[in-house]
Amino acid sequence: MASVEEDFPRGGTAKKPTESKTKVERTEVDNLFQSNEQAETKKRKGAAKDADKKFKKPKTGKGDRGLTLNAEAKCVEILHIKNLKEGTLMLGCVKDVTDFEVTVGLPCGMEGFLSIMNICDSYTKLLSEQLDSADTEEICSLQHLFYPGMVLRCILAKLDVGKQGSLSFQLSINPKLVNKALSSSTLKAGMALSGCVESVEDHGYIVDIGINGTKAFLPKNARENLPEELKVGQYLTCQVERVKNEGRVVHLSVSPPTAARVCAESQQGWNLTNLLPGLLVKATIKKVTKHGLILEFLSSFTGQVDFLHMEPEQTRSYTEGNEVQACVLYVEPSTRLVGLSLRSFLVQPGARIQHAPAAGERIGEVVKACKMVAMHHMSGAMVELPDKTLAFVHRNHLKEPNEPSNENRVLAMTEHTCRILNFSPIDQIHFVSVRKSVVEKRFHRYHDIQAGQLVEGTVSVLIGHGMVVHLSGQIKGLVPRTHLSDIILKNPEKKYTQGMRIKCRVLSVDADKKNLYLTRKKALVESALPLFLSYTDARPGLVSHGYIVCIKDFGCIVRFYNDVKGLVPLKELSSQPIINPEEIFYVGQVLKAKVLQCNPDKAKLVLSFKAAAEGDMDEVAHPQFDCEVGQRLEARIHKKSATGLEVAILPDEIRAVIPTMHLSDHLSNCPLLLESMQEGDTISNLICFSRNKQNIAISKKPTVRWSLEQGVFAKDFSEVTVGMQLIGWIKNLMPYGVFVEFPNGLVGLAPNSALADKFISNAAIVFQPGQTVMAKVTNLDVEKRRFLVTLKISEVICPEGDAQTRLINGLQERRAVTEMLAMRENSDLLQQLASLIVGQKLKLTVDTVDSGARFKSDDLAGATITATKDQVMGVELTLGQKVTAVILHVDILSRCVHVSILPTLVAKKKSLAEGLKYAAMVQHINQDFATISLGDTAQLTVIQTSCHLNEAFPSESDQLKAGMSLSVEVIEASCQELQGLALVSWVFTSPKQQAATFKNWERSRGHCFGDVVRGKVRTVKPASIQVTLEDGSTGSVHVSEVMELAKVPLGSFPTSTVKVGSEITARVIGGREVSSHRFLPFSHPKFKYNIPELTLIPSKLDENKDFKPVSAKEKINGYTVGEEIKCFVSKFNPKKKTLEVTTHPCVTMTVDLLGIITDPKYSSHPEKLYKIGQAVLAKVVEVTSGPQRCTLSLTGVHQLETGSVTLGMVTNSHPQFGVQVKLPFGNLGTAAVTDLRDAYKPNPLAGYSKDQLLRCFLLGKENGTWQLSLRLSRLNPEQSKLVKDPEVLSVDHLRAGQVIRGYVKSVSEHGVFIRLSMSITGRAQLQQCTKYYVKDHKVLSEHLPPNTLLTTKICSIDKEEGLVYLSLLPEDTGKPDVLPENLGLQLRPVGEKRTYDSKTTTCDSKKKKKRTASESVQKQLESQIAKKAKKSKTDDNDSGVEVYFREEEDKRDKEPKSDSVKKVTPSPAGPSRLQVAAGFSWDAHLSSLKPALAAQEGESSDGEDQDESKKPQKKTRHELQQEKKAAEKALVQRETELMDPSLRPQDAAAFERLLLASPNSSLLWLQYMAHHLQATQIEQARAVAERALKTISFREEQEKLNVWVALLNLENMYGSEESLKKVFERALQFCEPMPVYQQLADIYAKCNKTKEAEGLYKTMVRRFRQNKAVWLSYGAFLLQQGQSDGASVLLQRALKSLPTKESVDVIAKFAQLEFRYGDPEKGRTMFDKVLTSYPKRTDLWSVFLDLMFKHGSQKEVRALFDRVIALSVSVKKIKFFFKRYLEYEKKHGTPQTIQAVKEKAVEFVEAKGNKAAN
């Protein structure tokens, strides 16, 4: 309170300090030059005695040297941890540097940590900028700023206490902390200061020395000793060269980096306040003791040198009065203890500190036969190691922790065994321990642990990915979650509890990174097998336990120790064949594995589960298989997978595998056969091609079966000979060749050169895995047991009739698939399709005519019957026409029949003669098979697409295609196996034709660029002309080279002007390659071409005119965007739907679909608009250089303009964005849901699908995207009808009261947001959405998904802010309520709904200055007194203003009063929703208000009327008696009313009367304010508040606070920001600041002024950071706003700011807030973490249970109860939780669960009883 009152005085003049206070202040000033011992010892009760020992009492007399400025120590000690305090300055030496922290060695063996955030302010700022933006300059890492051995001046910034009580020193080198005692006035030339580089300038560096108002500059020429460029944050020790402008500017120079080498002088102004470590001083030895020296330096300062910092060689030479040079080691500011060092490495110039011992790393080493040479009772002892090295034992390590100290006994021992703990670089000595527990400790550091060791540890904590186990104080390891047990534990907390001792085995250890991984798997911990700690340990034949870390299709990866891992191939997993290992094994499984192969150099290890299992079985006899390689088999399908079939060989049910590729010689048949087979089917005609001890592989390939039955195979490698011909299949494709597998597991390599007679560079193009091939052995390598083969057709001998046999087998396989599918599905259609054969004629009806035709048939209903355009060529078809067609192919899987109606095929069939040759044509291709027609015989048959097993087609031109001509020879006119079709053999062309073609190709190489040639036109095509030249070669004329471009009419076909057979003169302008017909570039004039490209343009034929070749790049770069060019249609790409046009033989350009058409009706067949070879006019849209590309438009426009209509293609539809459309010329657009149509539909996006074409109106372009409208009124304004839902272009087009329709955008806790147009969104508050009372907005969001069409009424419009407030209530819209009645929701009271009809409902209306009094003010006024005012028995006594909806209660309260004589006349407006005693309606308009005095006037006039009515009539005695009784009764009632405090006053006089009796009642004052607010008397209400503040006693702080809060509410509602700020500032002066801040923040939050509230909260957490309630209030606010991440950040800030003891409660409170306002799952996680660390906090367990009752499932609640009753707390507390558990089960559980709880309680009691008995 005192501090708060000083900051916020309560008024009045400040009191003058008394005499006593003045004396105290003067004493403190005098003591500046004396010891602060007395003040310090009062604060530190326990350290009083130690302080007396250390320091002498202050001297008061005069000495030889004047005053002694600090006390002299009685006994010299080393610096102990317990004496360290925050603010201590020390000299440190860098030991280690990591990414975010520097480990610093401190004096006396201590160690501190320098965080990356404690370097300097400029470096911290640079880090923050780096996090916020990626563009910040490169930041120097800590490794570049610090190095081991570097000496630093540092300050102890913070003392952290660990969980086990260990201290951690957080250091800082920030100059603002290190040099905080210095000021600009104290700076003198010659001073040695430390600082950090703040910025790098042109001529030097600005150095931060931590002194406000002083700029320190280091010129670049003043850093001779630091040749490297300095970085921001670099630590420097500098010497002050010059001081300018009274210390505002300082020039520096850099001395050697180890320490300042300039002696500090007293003239420089050094004193105990600003003395810095690292300074060199000249000192005089004042006293020599056994344990050190006491020195006097800088004239009058006293310091001590402990024995560790005396130079060892000069220990005996130190005498009193000697002059020495010393270095300041540490300065403790509170006790003013100064430690000095005389060690040469700190004092001598140029000396460097060794951060590590010269003899090497010895930490953790146990050394025997050590001698103790000296004992320093207050510090420790010096020990001499066997190598004569001195070491130091701290006094704490001379004994065990709980033993009494006996230093003499330790000193008397002749020998000691020590463990080296650490090396102190600043002391240059090892620190050791003679504790027996430390020496005998098994593990002192991570280097002592080896993988495979069995260790014992203590369970520390369970985390998400495992369990932390402590092996010793500083060593901890992680047991990964998969290693907690042999199986995966779902609830590990049931098995492991904190503090449990467990036994583990070390999996791996990384001592440098301090990573230790352990396992609890029983099989690994108890394994007696040899351990594989390295690959050299894994010798072939050894067996060890390992665990699976990864499961792949090719096997399992098993891991051992120290990252030793190996592969178990698929065949070594089990004795049974396994196809899918994931079904058998799981990650983490422990298995025995036997080493098959190991290569330590390459770290490769091959293992076997199967071999290890066989070793365990002691060679149990395996079942003998009766089948041999080459034996025919029958099998039943056991399991089917994508890779093949698992079968059981009959009759012995022996398991085997049929790979998918071994089902047929034709790879296209393999998936069909696999599809048709089912589990349980029996397969015949199988043959075994490979077997080993456990696995059998069988094949159904007919060719392989034939070779095995005929004996054409090798049983093993020894039988393979050069020249042997074998049947095999492709196993693998490699870049250098193909591996071919043969029976019995033999594999040979066919190099690329031996694949085909033509060289093939890429085998993957022509061969497929599994393809059957015929190979001939060419080379044999006996030593390496490998051989080479050739697949060249010219070198292998094919068996006679092989092609025909394979054809028959392939067609029979397809036939079997068809029949099997037809039989299995029992479908009439499939049975009819199965009965169809190639060549059969059908009667069909034309259904559709496109590029081809589709037909329908009554007999094949449901089947697709199609004919390609080649099969209907020359036949005119009309819809509904009856035709006769012949079957080419039947695809039973897709239910498709391919037919032809060509007259040559439908004609009457002619008979075939065997042995004759026919010219055949390919009609249809289906993978491995083709249907061909034989000449003019109308006969069809089927052939294979390859004549030979090894046939390879390097290019597509070599492959068989529809329309290709063949030469066939009939072998059998009607083959029974082919269902009556002819069996033929075929070849491509005759050898003579091939030779002629070769000669023509040779002759065509003679033409050069520019040659004039003559020839005859052979063919004329729309896009080119073929010319036969005089030398017999063929040339080509491009459509653009027929005539001059300017003379070509648009729409014409230039090639049509040239007639076939006419003789022409042409000139060579280029050429094309024979194979690809690619236009060759003009690289050299003498270049010779294969097919010459010619021109017929007269201007180019003149030989005298030389014309240069034009490249495609030059041609395309010559075009400009928007230019009109004439071009010719080349072809249409149906897949991409693009049109290719050409302007030159080397230039081809594309036109997108949207650049071709302008009407969607042409979208299905845009190629019909333009014919090939036609001349068209196009505009250039885009020209790109890399790659060379030019895009054109045929629509007449090349860019989009606002207000125009264009065509677009739908790409996507999104509920929030609307319809996304691809526009011409690479543009994108979006049409909002309100711009899709003139009359809204309930589901606006339903009619739009991907790739749909639309006409769009361009509204405008924003951020590169066009805003579109699809409204008919925009697209066709003339034809559009009356618009039902007009466009809303701006808020100005709307008016209050208007009924408008819109689409739901989103639903949140702030209301329903409704999209009225593309840019305008209105909001309906939750109260305005439905007549039902809705607690959670999620109810609305479930029934109002996005884009729900709603009718709404505009309540009000804020045009300045662009806000539209809407209503969805049925009485406003005339539509049913948005929520259905069957939800069972409670109806909202009638008065409540009217509340929001006024425009003054929302706090968002910032511009309204005059408003009627609203219930929000009333609620806030009342809420301030709700806590303090006691509730009366009557309903009217809880508050002076009725806040909630009490219309019905008011009616009930007023009914009994009707019996009284004096009646209150009701207001003409009728009863209102919110009423005060005066009858004021909170939602009435100002014009309808009635003064509050109306009630009293009504009473008086009523009395007068009675008096007047008495005069004209004479009353009887009885009436007079009745009147007398009534008058007396009324008088008594009036007196009772005046005495009843619960009745509310009706006028100002009544309030004044009550306030005279109770002037300190804030309740009355607030009711008085509300009385004025009812009459909209704002100023009177303010005046009442001011009176209240003056009248209420100053002792009634809460009462005054209530009035202040009411005044704040008043100003917030009716005042301005300025008036509110003034009231707030006044309130802060007269009240406790924190509650005032909190109340104003609540006011802002309730009025949705989130920005103001958040700003206020930020101020609060800065000002009241030690107040827990502020952090909690801010957290609740953030969570209510949905800022969960912000609340998490705030929690971390709160934990740093608040005391440590508050941390648990703060986290628990934030977790409760998460449950209430945020994410319950997050809250549950927070509680789990807290209770894991503090399991005995039963109060938190109880809170957690209460929250889980509301937010958790029954399963989760029961699990939580089980955890609670297992706690190790008192029986009384456990009994309480058992009671709660039982109550919960009685309410929510079943009899079984209730009984289970009782049994658990009995078990608990019995366990406690047994424990007590034991």
Image (cartoon, grey):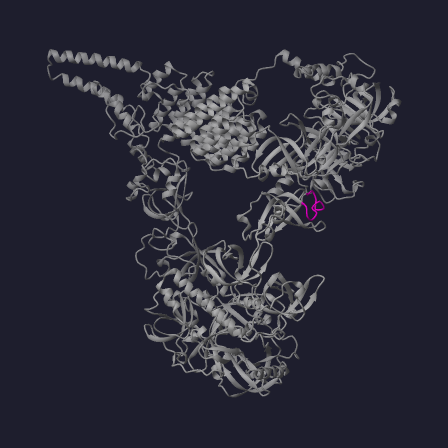
Residue 527, compared with residue 1016, is above or below; it is: above
Residue 1198 among magenta residues: no
* Image side of residue 688 versus residue 269, left or right: left
Could you tell me which quadrant the C terminus lies in? top right
Give the residue at x 66% y 42%.
561
Q: Main secondary structure of the magenta part?
A: loop
Pinpoint residue 358: horizontal percent, then vertical percent: 82, 35
Residue 365 appears anywhere in the view: yes
Q: Quadrant of residue 268?
A: top right
385 or 1231: which is nearer to us? Answer: 385
Q: Nearer the viewer, residue 942 or 1194?
A: 942
Place of residue 367 in the rendered image (x, y in percent of width and height, measured from the top left): 79, 29
Which one is nearer the viewer's eye here, 1590 or 329? 329
- Residue 1616 shows in the view: no
Q: Quadrant of the N terminus?
A: top right
Residue 1423 % position (x, y)? 40, 25
In the displayed structure, 159 sits above or below 38; it is below
Residue 245: percent from left, percent from top: 73, 33
Q: Is residue 558 left or right of residue 1428?
A: right
Q: Which residues are magenta?
A: 532-542
Above or below: residue 708 compared with residue 278: below
The mark total stands at 0
Res. 97 image quadrant: top right
Q: Is residue 201 above or below residue 1572?
A: below
**Residue nearest the viewer, comparing 1593 with 615:** 615
